[in-house]
Image (cartoon, grey):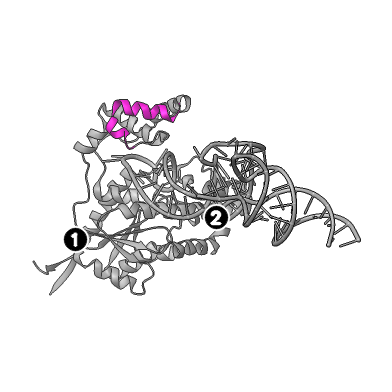
RNA sequence: GGCGACGUACCCAAGUGGUUAAGGGAAGGCUCUGCAAAAGCCUCAUUCGUCGGUUCGACUCCGACCGUCGCCU
């Protein structure tokens, strides 16, 4: 007798509203898996409705990781995610179960598989100083500084892109080395085991329709209440979790600074823009198996695609 | 029916004799090495309701027509 034991990770990625969470749970049930969320905002406790977090019933069906795992005030990043997610996936495999990485944050998925460079991480002190410089002399000044110190890295930075310039200067200041060189010469840990990556796709109009539909269903009413609760609990608007789409706008709605019509319009528009950026990101990612999210045999199809992740081992051996 | 105002891109809208016909939104595309649902970038009217006229030259001035809105009857 032989038993199939997973030896790699199944990734399910795609734009928002393509049904990643549902599919991940269905496949996990079928293949005895556990879900690791690759989502920048579902990690935050209390941020539920606006982040399209998997529902309680979904969460109860199969073990989930990195959902509700951080306080909304805590920073969370691609690097932290990648390290923790790789560790979790290793542990799931060690238990003889299939890790399923599911989420829409392309940067996190790339950091998980390809790794980030080995070097200084974010440092708030340095950042504050650089931000102050940027506020006084302008973003273009920061970008020019990068151009002087690391012309190669600067080529990828737009003249007004203060955020990216600050990160590069931060690396320079903290390591004394050029980021472009560190990126090339000091790759950090990556996912070395096998993987199958599935990209859920939907025609633009269908996707936008689903986004609008999701907007109509219930959460319109839940979101303002949720935001009131968060604010009452003392979560500041500057908390990282409040950067999620819709949350600051909802705070404005709740305080009366934004009309309901304007609020709805912004949420829908921002979500559409987000979906578009996600598609752009995944379009560029290699090794993805594109699958129509509305095909009737979706679960069977994905389970079939995941078969190479199971190596046959002989019992007692 | 009369009088008046207006008609510029998918939407809002500036321009009022010589401009490559502003700007914003939407839409589409791109970039991405520790805040990424972030941040930045690019594309998007050979043409101004239509037809005529004046002029070297018209989105701009004149006329007619069409359309929209308002007021009056």
Residue displayed at 25% across by 70% down? A304
Residue displayed at 33% across by 55% down? A283
- Reading the image, the residue beneath label 1 is A7
Residue at the far left: name it. A317
Residue A224 visible in the displayed image? no
- Label 1, secondary structure: give it: loop
> Mark 1, residues whose alpha carbon is within 10 Å: few (<14), some, or many (≥20)?
many
| Quarter of the image with the C terminus of chain A in it | bottom left
- Label 2, secondary structure: give it: helix
Residue A167 horizontal/vertical position (percent):
35, 34
Residue displayed at 47% across by 41% down? A239
- Reading the image, the residue beneath label 2 is A223
- Measured Cα–Cα span from mark 2 to mark 1: 40 Å
Q: Depth check: give the residue in front, B73 or A292.
A: B73
| Quarter of the image with the N terminus of chain A in it | bottom left
Residue displayed at 22% across by 47% down? A190
Q: Which mark is residue A261?
A: none
Residue A280 horizontal/vertical position (percent):
37, 52
Question: What segment is highlighted magenta in the picture?
Answer: A138-156
Residue B63 horizontal/vertical position (percent):
75, 52
Relative side of A105 to B62, left or right: left
Residue B66 horizontal/vertical position (percent):
70, 62
Give the image quarter of residue A103: bottom left
Q: Chain of mark 1?
A: A
Relative side of A289 to A67, left or right: left
Give the image quarter of residue A179: top left
| Earlier sequence position, callout 2 versus callout 1 | 1
Q: Tell me whether circle 2 and circle 1 mark residues in contact (CB < 8 Å).
A: no
Is A286 rendered above or below residue A243? Answer: below
> Mark 2, residues whose alpha carbon is within 10 Å: few (<14), some, or many (≥20)?
many
């Amino acid at each position: 007798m032989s038993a199939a034991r997973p030896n790699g990770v199944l990734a399910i990625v795609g734009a928002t509203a393509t049904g990643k969470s549902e599919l991940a749970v269905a496949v996990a049930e079928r293949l005895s898996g556990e879900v690791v969320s690759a989502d920048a905002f579902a990690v935050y406790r209390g941020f539920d409705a606006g982040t399209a977090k998997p529902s309680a019933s979904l969460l109860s069906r199969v073990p989930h990781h990195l959902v509700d795992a951080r306080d909304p005030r805590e920073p969370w990043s691609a690097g932290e995610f990648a390290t923790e997610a790789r560790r979790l996936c290793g542990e799931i495999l060690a238990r003889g179960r299939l890790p399923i990485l599911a989420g829409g944050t392309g940067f996190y998925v790339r950091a998980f598989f390809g790794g980030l460079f080995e070097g200084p991480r974010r440092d708030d002190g340095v950042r504050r100083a650089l931000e102050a410089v940027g506020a006084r002399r302008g973003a273009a000044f920061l970008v020019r500084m990068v151009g002087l110190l690391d012309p190669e890295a600067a080529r990828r930075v737009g003249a007004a892109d203060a955020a990216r310039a600050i990160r590069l200067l931060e690396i320079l200041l903290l390591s004394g080395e050029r980021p472009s060189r560190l990126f090339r010469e000091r790759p950090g840990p990556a996912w070395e085991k096998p993987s199958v990556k599935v990209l859920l796709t939907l025609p633009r109009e269908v996707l936008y329709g689903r986004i609008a539909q999701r907007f109509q269903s219930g959460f319109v009413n839940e979101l303002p209440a949720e935001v009131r609760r968060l604010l009452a609990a003392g979560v500041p608007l500057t908390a990282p979790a409040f950067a999620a789409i819709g949350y600051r706008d909802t705070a404005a709605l709740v305080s009366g600074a934004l009309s309901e019509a304007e609020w709805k319009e912004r949420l829908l528009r921002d979500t559409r823009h987000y979906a578009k950026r996600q598609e752009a990101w995944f379009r560029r990612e290699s090794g993805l198996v594109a699958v129509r999210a509305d095909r009737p045999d979706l679960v069977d199809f994905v389970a079939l695609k995941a078969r190479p992740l199971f190596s046959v081992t002989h019992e007692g051996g």
